[in-house]
Amino acid sequence: MYDIKPFPIPVVADLGPGTQSEDDTLDYITMPQGMETFHTPVLPEPEDIARHAGAVQVLHQVLAALRQVAEGAAPRIETTRVTLAGLALDDLTLINQVLGEGEVSAQVLAGDGRPVLQIQESVFAGVWRVIESQSDGSVRDWIEVGAVPAVLRQTAKLDASQTLAADMPVPPDVMNAPSVLVELEDQRRTWQPGQIAHVVNLSLLPLTPMDIAYLDHRLGTGRVLILSRGYGNCRITNCCVPHTWRVVYYNSQDTVILNSVEVTDMPEVACAAPEDLCDSVERLHEVLQWVNQA
């Protein structure tokens, strides 16, 4: 039925070890080696925790906020704050010990590059410590519960409303950046809340260093900086155009393995997923049950 053509490569009968000569070994990019996983915080005895009524009350408020957000209609957007104002130093130390440090941290910078907001996710995904530096040197400290602190979205939206510098002429060495900018602008025009992120993988495109520099100039760099540590590191910065983020992944040797631009309200890698929020409810509930034994 079929016109079988001659096999163009001779069939080798002996394929055992040592029968084939090898050229230079393949040099693969070193992939990330470690992964951040959940570690139960090292807690003092429940009797010691129970003596800190202020800390226990805050933890119960955090658990209630977690349930509210996890069971809400929009867990990716809704957030709830739990204030730490007036809490005794011992209570605050205990809360820090219980919450620990998770894999995502963030900063919001002032116009001069000085951090005005320091954000750290706890070991309970979706539970964030937020510290705001005031102009008079004082600080405001609170816990925010949700997929990602609302101030990060708010700052990115404010940065996108600023007027960028006048467009510069396309330098002669820039080849493919203009077409990427057209694609991103088209995606921004049609973007709707809740839409899946549109990702442009710059690592797979034939872009020169001048192309990347031109993209950076046209998109601008905002004041939000997010670092996610899972396999290696992921550095996220907002652009000065709406719904646009630079997302760069590094391996454990700090070598760039993926350079991308995302059109979205917030990159997925920075957010606690709905299932993570539900998992945090269970884990924090177990901790408070243990405390309630005292």
Image (tube, rainbow, N blue to C red):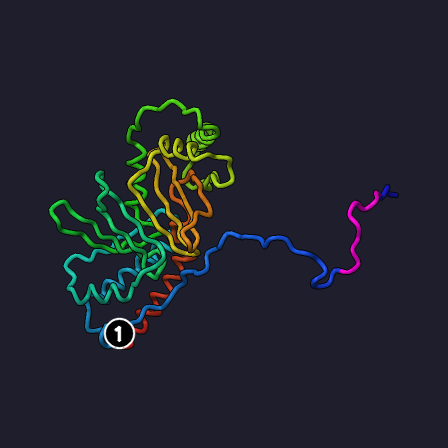
Residue type at mark 1: give it: Pro
Residue 256 location, x and y as percent? 43, 47
Residue at image coords 14%, 59%: 86
Residue 179 location, x and y as percent? 48, 28
Residue labelled with disc 1: 44
Quadrant in the picture for residue 244:
top left
Residue 274 in view: no
Residue 106 location, x and y as percent? 30, 50
Residue 121 in view: yes
Q: Is residue 77 above or below residue 220?
A: below
Dot 1 crowding, Cα within 10 Å, few <14, some 14–19, many 20+: few
Residue at image coords 40%, 52%: 233
Within the magenta stretch, is there residue 10? Answer: yes
Residue toward you, 27 or 79 = 27
Q: Is residue 293 above or below residue 169?
A: below
Q: Quadrant of the N terminus?
A: top right
Quadrant in the picture for residue 128:
bottom left
Q: Which residues are magenta?
A: 5-14
Judged left or right of residue 10, residue 253 is left
